[in-house]
Amino acid sequence: MLGKLIKHEFYACGRLMGPAYLVVLAIALIGRIMTWLVTRQAVYDSVAPAFYKVLNGLANFLSIAYLLAFIALIILSVVFMIYRFYKNFFTDQGYLMMTLPTKPRHLVFSKFVNAIVFAFFSIVIALASLYISMPDSDEINTTLRQLFDAVSKIITSNSGSIESQVGVPLWVLVVEIVVFALIYLARFVISFYFCVAFGQLISKNHKILGGIVAFIVLEIATSILSSLYMALNTKVLPDLIPAITESSGKAMQSSLIGNSIIMILFTAVLYFIICRIMARRLNLD
């Protein structure tokens, strides 16, 4: 049943996000073509001045349109993720969803998995469209290769020093950073789901307002937890603050691992609370 829920949610999200991705890529591509045209001397010499002004104005318009579409894509990814969760479980649709032969944790998990997947898709599409919109991709490719070669040389020549500072092999550090990013994304998604679910307990007749209040409270709680972790760390490791000030690798390692563990526990607690609310305190009025 869980697989069917994930599949259905994937198709439902894809019906909106798929066309949105295509629109952003199309605007980026057409804008790139128009920019290329107006920067060609041959085009400038072969067309009437009035027509060239039209082309130049269209290129500028597409540049603005791409910027707006790029921003809209990021906002849409977040808003749609929250809206799907709210609409399916805390409105009239909840009567149908909650009658499915499955448990609330499976319903929440199906939304969670697809939110992570489409967040990744959105990031990839955003970067791809940004690359397409660049006027000179050859120069960008050359710059990226030079940057990659320079970073590789620095890492190769200083790998021993970096590893001694960090305390682990470089590949372990890279894996830790990637895992931390995924954990942060998971915490981000579950936090919004929690705000929607808990918000309807705060204000049953104004669920959106309740969700906003819950978000503020959650962010305050997150900041307090981070501060407590740093305070405890400074008690156990008195030299942590000077180490962070000096950009010590071991301090970064401690912060990375510690914050990852905190976020995993925090996300697990929020997930459990969401499931409990949906099982015991769901309000569909």
Image: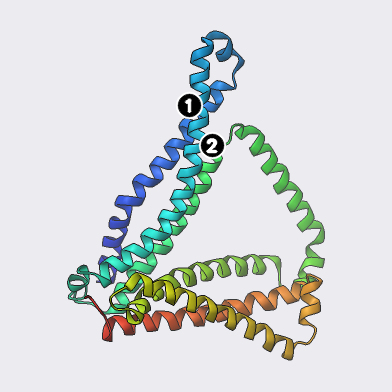
Tell me, for residue 133, which label it has, or none: 2
Q: Is residue 127 left or right of residue 76?
A: right
**Vertical comparison of 279 with 195: above or below:** below
Binning the other alpha carbons within 10 Å of mark 1 as few (below 14), some (14 to 19) or many (20 upward) gives: some
Question: Which one is in front, 20 or 254?
Answer: 20
Tell me which residue sits at (51%, 42%) in the image: 67
What amino acid type is highlighted by mark number 2?
Ser
Residue 235 at x, y percent in the picture: 73, 91
Of tags 2 and 1, the one toward the viewer is 1
Residue 262 at x, y percent in the picture: 56, 81
Tell me, for residue 252, which label it has, or none: none
Separation of residues labelled 2 and 1 (CA atoms): 15 Å
Determine whether the residue tagged by mark 1 lies in a helix, strand or loop: helix
Q: Is residue 251 left or right of residue 129?
A: right
**Vertical comparison of 10 with 130: above or below:** below
Determine whether the residue tagged by mark 2 lies in a helix, strand or loop: helix
Tell me which residue sits at (41%, 54%) in the image: 76
Image quarter of residue 176? bottom right
Residue 167 appears in the rendering: no
Residue that numbered label 1 is attached to: 58
